[in-house]
Image (cartoon, rainbow, N blue to C red):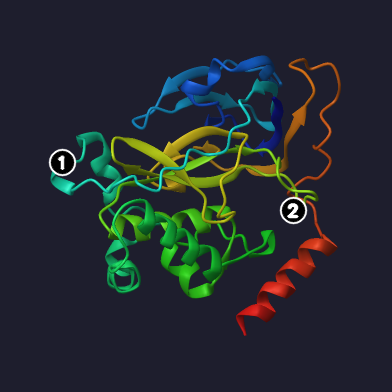
Amino acid sequence: MFVRFGYEIGIRCPQPTPMMTYLSVVAEKRRDIRRERGPVTSPIVKMEEIVDPHGNACLRMIAPEGDFKLSYDAVIEDDGRPDVSDPLAQAVPVERLPPNTLPYLAASRYCETDRLGTLAWRLFGDVAPGWPRVQAICDYVHERLVFSYGYAQAMRTALEAHEDRLGVSRDYAHLAIALCRCMNMPARYVNGYMADLETEQRVAPMDFNAWFEVFLGDRWYTFDAKNNARRAGRIAVARGRDAADIPLIQTFGKHELTGFTVWTCVEADGGLSRSHRDANVSLLTPWFSESWSRHVQERDRNRH
């Protein structure tokens, strides 16, 4: 199958400002891109691709004074298979973990393992290590938090999400990551696109999504506490310890976000012969969905 994905992001700077983006598709998925336009800037500026310590491809540039737009549109071929599942995957003893996984055991900006350890061991200490324990964590986080864009808060940590019992996809990922690390399982944050392949009706505007990966056995496995289901059509763009490592846009100076539109949808072929269909809702504008409102109300009732 083919998945169309892309973005249009606008900013306004009071002066020329250095800028980095974490918006490039991860290296192992680039070979599946069948057609792409961009990234393109308006006005045109020089862009340089670099690789960060986590292996992510980043673009850096100088955003000019005034309005500046960055856009990208592509089609990628996907095998249509859901996330790999292995209920027998085992947790690896810390002393035998590969050295490159060890940074994903420690506390990070949004994942306070030192403050969540007692809770984690009380909740999951009796669950079999490995896949069953990670799934138990996903189940807990999925039921603990209520999702809505109205609850988005850039500085919310895993502990705050747990206490507030609400958030967006990054909050679900941060809390699950922190709990996994408390249980001595390396976990890392992933940002990317995800096509709504299995939903009959979209209840929220398309956005970049966050999920996480846990190292079990000899590989990283994908988990998603927000959806708490295996999904197809994921397109990862960056991985890190948490969202602080991989901001979509990082400017080294003042800027104002003036536009933010994202699309992900299934296409019939690998061409870019027509306009994308799903870039009609900007996340900067007020948004309301009757179906999502009913969903939140139903979940709230079930909690009481």
Per the model, the C-alpha gap separating discs 1 and 2 is 42 Å
Residue bearing the label numbered 1: 96
Mark 1 surroundings within 10 Å by alpha-carbon count, few (fewer than 14), some (14 through 19), many (20 or more): few
Q: Amino acid at mark 2?
A: Ala
Residue shown at the point (58%, 63%) measured from the top left: 167
The picture quadrant where one finds residue 133 is bottom left
Instruction: Give whichever of 225, 90 is nearer the camera.
Output: 90
| Residue 156 image position (x, y, % from top left) | 49, 62
Q: Residue at x 42, y 48 (%)?
A: 242
Q: SS for tag 1?
A: helix
Q: Is residue 153 left or right of residue 181?
A: right
- With 30 as the anchor, is 268 left or right in this view? right
| Image point (62%, 17%), residue name | 33
- In the current view of this chain or complex, which residue is farthest to the bottom? 304
Q: Position of residue 120 (x, y in %)?
A: 33, 68
Image quarter of residue 218: top left
